[in-house]
Structure formats: C-alpha cells, structure tokens
C-alpha cells in the first residue's frame, strides 16, 4: 500500500522557493521502501536547491516494492519513478502501459548476498531458501547470476520475496530464510551483526543497469510536462555531479542521515561503497545493448517471450538512447 512520505525530504522541498515569477511544478515521484542509498542524488537535489532552481517541487511517494511503484506509475498515480530496476518498466512497456524509461540512475548493482552465520559460501546455499525483492525483478536476475556463477543451478534452491531490503534482513534475522539479497545501508547493519557476505552481484551483472528513472507517457504528453521533464533531468544531473565530488562527502552523508534517520557509520560506509563501485558514475544515457541484455535474461527465465522494440523503451526527445 502506498503511503506519502511525511519526512524531512518533503519539508525541505517545501522550504525552497520556486523560480521568481513562476509557480513551481510539482512532480509526484515514486520511490521504493524508504529513504536510502539509491535515492541519494534526489535528496541532494532537494537539500541543495537544484530542483527548486529548476522550478520543480518533488512530491515523494514511497511504495513497498518496485512492482508497486511501477503499477502506480502505469496507472497515472505517479508522474515519474525515481529509480527502479529496469525489469519493472520493461514489463510495463511490454504489456502496453504508458510508461517510458527516461534515464539510467545507477549502473553497477549494490545488491549483496548475505547468509546465515553458519554459511560461508554460495555453494552451501544449494537446497536452501534465498529471499529477494521480486520473482521477476532485477534482484531475481542478480540471484540467478550469483548462483549460476558459483555452480548452483536454477531449481537447486528456493526463492521467496519481500520488496524492501529491511524486510529481507528481518527475515534473515528470524531464521526463516538462509540468505538475503541486501543493499546499503541495511547491508552494513547485517555485517555489523556478524552475518557473512557470500557474493557481490556487481561482479556478475556488469552488462545491465541497476536502476532507471521512468515516466508516465500520458503525463509527459500533457501541458508543459515535457519542459518540466527536461528541467528535472538537468537538475538531477547537477545533483549527481555534486554527489560525485569527493569534497562533498561529509555533507552528502549528513543529507542521507537527515532523510533516513540512520547512524553516521552505516551512512559513511554506504557513501564509500557507492563511490568504490562507481554506482552513480553515469551520464544518464540508456544503453540499448544493456536493455537487450536484460530482456535476454528475462526471455531465458520464461518471463518475456519477445523483447520490447528498442524504439518503444525511451521517450523521444528526452531519453538519450545510445548504442
């Protein structure tokens, strides 16, 4: 069930004045779970005023899973999705929903496979239960890549689902699953509690993006929304560039701490991990080659009989498609 995030992010967004002489354009923006690492450039853009300078006010709306976000985007309850795995919008586009991918948000995956304290390797997960974010989403692909890459075939393990990383960690703590796919900062909470890391998904999925920004086509086609999207994408680019400047490390940490109510160390570790794997080191371009890689895996999983034509994926004049 969706809930509107009455958090510091919204309060700060409201505090910034729109461009002189023009009312700010409000953009209902969907996010998964709760404030965390994947939304970092968005929070930077709010706190540093980049969206306000562009005449945009973000209305952040959180949902339990990427599937929920994409369903609401397809229905028109959201204007854009701030970041989900590419599988969800691709499925929506395949089914004829008015959805388009706007930009690549993050390139390498931050998902890490964490196991029970008695398990030391992926091979030991044969016959065990792994919890991931969805049966058809990008996290499921990562689990498949991790397991296959270590000699554990599909069918040799069970998969269950909880949308948000915090919920998956809770399942691991309760003993109901044997391993969980986690991302920062929950990952570092699990490590601090003694749960071992058995695999990093970015080592097995370098041919596909981790997260993309999507838009409802009907919303984009109405009023002045194409102009709004151009301003929003440009403001997001400023936010990402600010985040990537190492001189801003401590302030970036403080921003996420304020948004998410997390401890200094786990946020600092999340920042360093993001920089280490070059999580946000992208110019936003959407790679046709990578989209084909994702759809090929979905086809092999029996989830997408035919690939979506590349010219149906992006929004003409806004999305920058390459190769």
Image (spheres, rainbow, N blue to C red):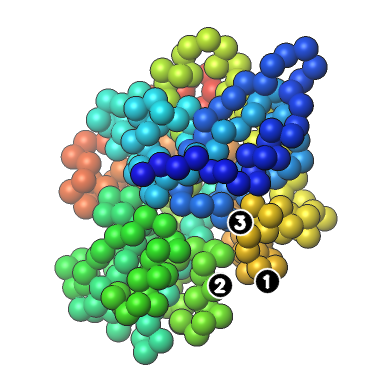
Observer-side mark, 3 or 2, equals: 3
User: Residue at (78%, 55%) from the top-left corner?
Assistant: 251
Q: Secondary structure at mark 3?
A: helix
Tell me, yes or no, whether the two marked residues, 2 and 1, touch with CB atoms within 8 Å.
Answer: yes
Q: Return the mark for residue 27.
A: none
Q: Is residue 241 visible?
A: no
- Give percent across and percent down for residue 1: 36, 44
User: Residue at (63%, 39%) from the top-left corner?
Assistant: 10
Q: Secondary structure at mark 2?
A: helix
Q: Look at mark 1 in the image and give the residue it sits on.
A: 265
The Cα atoms of the two marked residues, 1 and 3, are separated by 13 Å
Q: Earlier in the sequence, mark 2 or mark 1?
A: 2
Mark 1 burial class by Cα count in 10 Å: few <14, some 14-19, many 20+: some
- Give percent across and percent down for residue 287: 47, 38
Mark 2 burial class by Cα count in 10 Å: few <14, some 14-19, many 20+: some
Q: Is residue 19 visible?
A: yes
Q: Look at mark 2 in the image and give the residue it sits on.
A: 188
Horizontal relation, residue 94 to residue 65: left or right: left
């Amino acid at each position: 069930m969706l809930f509107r995030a009455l958090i510091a992010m919204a309060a700060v967004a409201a505090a910034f004045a729109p461009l002189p002489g023009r009312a700010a354009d409000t953009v209902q923006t969907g996010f998964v779970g709760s404030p965390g690492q994947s939304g970092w450039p968005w929070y930077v853009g709010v706190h540093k005023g980049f969206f306000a300078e562009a005449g945009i006010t973000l209305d952040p709306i959180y949902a339990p899973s990427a599937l929920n976000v994409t369903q609401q985007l397809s229905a028109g309850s959201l204007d854009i999705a701030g970041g989900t795995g590419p599988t969800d919008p691709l499925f929506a586009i395949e089914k004829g929903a008015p959805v388009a991918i706007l930009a690549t948000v993050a390139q390498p995956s931050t998902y890490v496979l964490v196991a029970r304290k008695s398990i030391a390797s992926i091979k030991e997960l044969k016959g065990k239960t792994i919890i991931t974010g969805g049966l058809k989403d990008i996290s499921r692909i990562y689990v498949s890549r991790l397991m296959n890459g270590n000699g554990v075939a599909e069918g040799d393990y069970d998969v269950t689902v909880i949308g948000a990383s915090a919920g998956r960690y809770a399942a691991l703590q309760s003993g109901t699953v044997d391993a969980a796919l986690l991302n920062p900062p929950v990952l570092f909470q699990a490590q601090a509690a003694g749960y071992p890391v058995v695999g990093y998904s970015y080592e097995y999925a370098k041919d596909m993006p981790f997260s993309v920004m999507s838009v409802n086509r009907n919303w984009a086609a109405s009023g002045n929304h194409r102009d709004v999207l151009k301003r929003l994408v440009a403001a997001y680019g400023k936010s990402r560039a600010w985040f990537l400047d190492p001189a801003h490390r401590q302030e970036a940490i403080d921003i996420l701490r304020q948004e998410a109510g997390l401890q200094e160390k786990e946020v600092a570790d999340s920042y360093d991990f993001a920089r280490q794997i070059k999580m946000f080191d992208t110019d936003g371009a959407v790679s046709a080659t990578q989209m084909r890689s994702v759809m090929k895996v979905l086809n092999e999983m029996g989830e997408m009989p035919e690939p979506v034509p590349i010219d149906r994926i992006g929004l003409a004049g806004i999305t920058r498609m390459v190769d």
